Image (cartoon, rainbow, N blue to C red):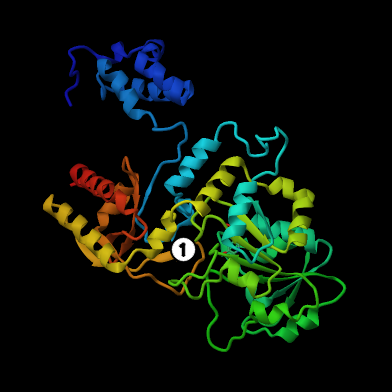
Amino acid sequence: MTQDPHGTDPRRQVPRTDTLLADLRLAGAGERLGRGLVKDAVQRVQQRVRAGEVAPDAAVDAVLAELPATASSLRPVLNATGVIVHTNLGRAPLSAAAVEAITAAAGTTDVELDLTTGRRGPRGAAAIAALLEAVPAAEAAIVVNNCASALALVATALGQGRELVLARGELVEIGDGFRIPELLEATGARLREVGTTNRVTVDDYRGALGPETGAVLKVHPSNFVVRGFTRAVEVAELAGALGGVPLVADVGSGLLRPHPLLPEEPDLQTTLAAGADLVLASGDKLLGGPQAGLVLGRADLVQRLRRHPLYRALRVDKTTLAALEATLRGPLPPVQQMLAADVDGLRARARALADRLSGAGVDAVAVDADSRVGGGGAPEHPLPGAAVSLPASFAEPLRRGARPVVGYLEDDRTLLNLRSVPSAADAELAAAVLEVARRWT
Ligand SMILES: *Cc1c(COP(=O)(O)O)cnc(C)c1O
């Protein structure tokens, strides 16, 4: 760049903040995004003008280019990791129906008002009704902030100052330092561990029951399996042996019914039908909905949880209730579609993308690549699929692009796994790769 490309020293022509903010387009952006965000962008551009990087009369366009798309800094990301439910990427992507429902409920809404009578109505009744229809073995249900909240509420309401009986092999860490036994103990419940790491029997459970027992808890180990000389007690076997002590099963993944592709994953309907008194699950894992903790089961126990003072601290907001209902009643959410995507279709998408990219001179090939459910679901169950393989150097610029794409490195190549990318986003994915190729090669 020449020293003074516009004939005069740009440093003396830096447009004033007031002048820029008064520009109609920037004033409009200020109304939409907030003046603070626009002012920050103005200041960054003024510095670039001062440095001679931006012409003074191009300052407004430069500010517009700097502005974020929304007033939140969270950006939409294309998840090409092959992990369908990726906790670092916000877990389940919501269905269009759920997004619409959130938008509709975002303003003032009848979440707790019966519009027919004008009186107060039960909060979230429609979402609960949808849950109960989907899981007929449940008599009642409540929704809280997440599955950890559901565990905390159950442990407090049934176990505080009492004992929760739990197998040693189920004292698990779910992820990012979240250890279930620590959460349970934080509520003031005492843990009564039974069995060994690899084996537990009905007699172990029976021997631990006493007047101090608040509940028996079964936790799905989610992200690991014990193999070899093992023995676990199934819900059906345990349910008949507890003499009226509540049996609570944390299934985690949120499958409502058995899923043919995930035969080992527990589901809410089967677990309740087998005799669990309460089941707990996440809303944003395999169910494919918003972050939520679902508690379903016996009406008297659900009522006890609802009446507990802690419930009020854990309840969900109107947008969560709207998204949950729409996930349950609406078309198959993206998580379920991605799970069901067949290998041939994924291979065809990978080939089409690779052809398009290599036609534009990018070193891209279609390869077979396994993907995973994620979110602790089916750790032993890789899903066959396909990816676009690119040079390793693409990974970082793809992540940092205008439309961030997160893939992964394998054998010194960047893989963009297509199972976790909605097929409608393939064109965007190609555009993001082409943009990186244009700017970096
Ligand atoms: C994921 C998981 C949890 C935690 O669920 P959140 O909704 O993230 O709070 C608890 N228990 C099990 C078995 C899980 O798999």
List x then y, in percent, for residue 368. Answer: 27, 68
Residue lying farthest to the front in this orientation: 116
Where, by quadrant of the figure, is residue 339 drawn?
Answer: bottom left
**Which is more toward the observer, 292 or 222?**
292
* Residue 434 versus residue 4 in the image, above or below: below
The structure residue drawn at horizontal position 70% and vertical position 32%, both measured from the top left corner, is 118
Where, by quadrant of the figure, is residue 166 drawn?
Answer: bottom right
Q: Is residue 114 left or right of residue 341?
A: right
Mark 1 lies on residue: 374
Q: Is residue 139 left or right of residue 80?
A: right
List x then y, in percent, for residue 34. Answer: 48, 23
Q: Is residue 248 visible?
A: yes
The structure residue drawn at horizontal position 47% and vertical position 20%, both measured from the top left corner, is 35
Q: Is residue 146 visible?
A: no
Q: Amino acid at mark 1?
A: Gly
Where on the image, by quarter, is ligand 1?
bottom right
The structure residue drawn at horizontal position 26% and vertical position 58%, both measured from the top left corner, is 392
How many marks the image carries: the answer is 1
Other-residue count near label 1 (Cα within 10 Å), few / some / many at <14 / 14–19 / ≥20: many
List x then y, in percent, for residue 398. Answer: 30, 48
**Which is more toward the observer, 245 or 151?**
245
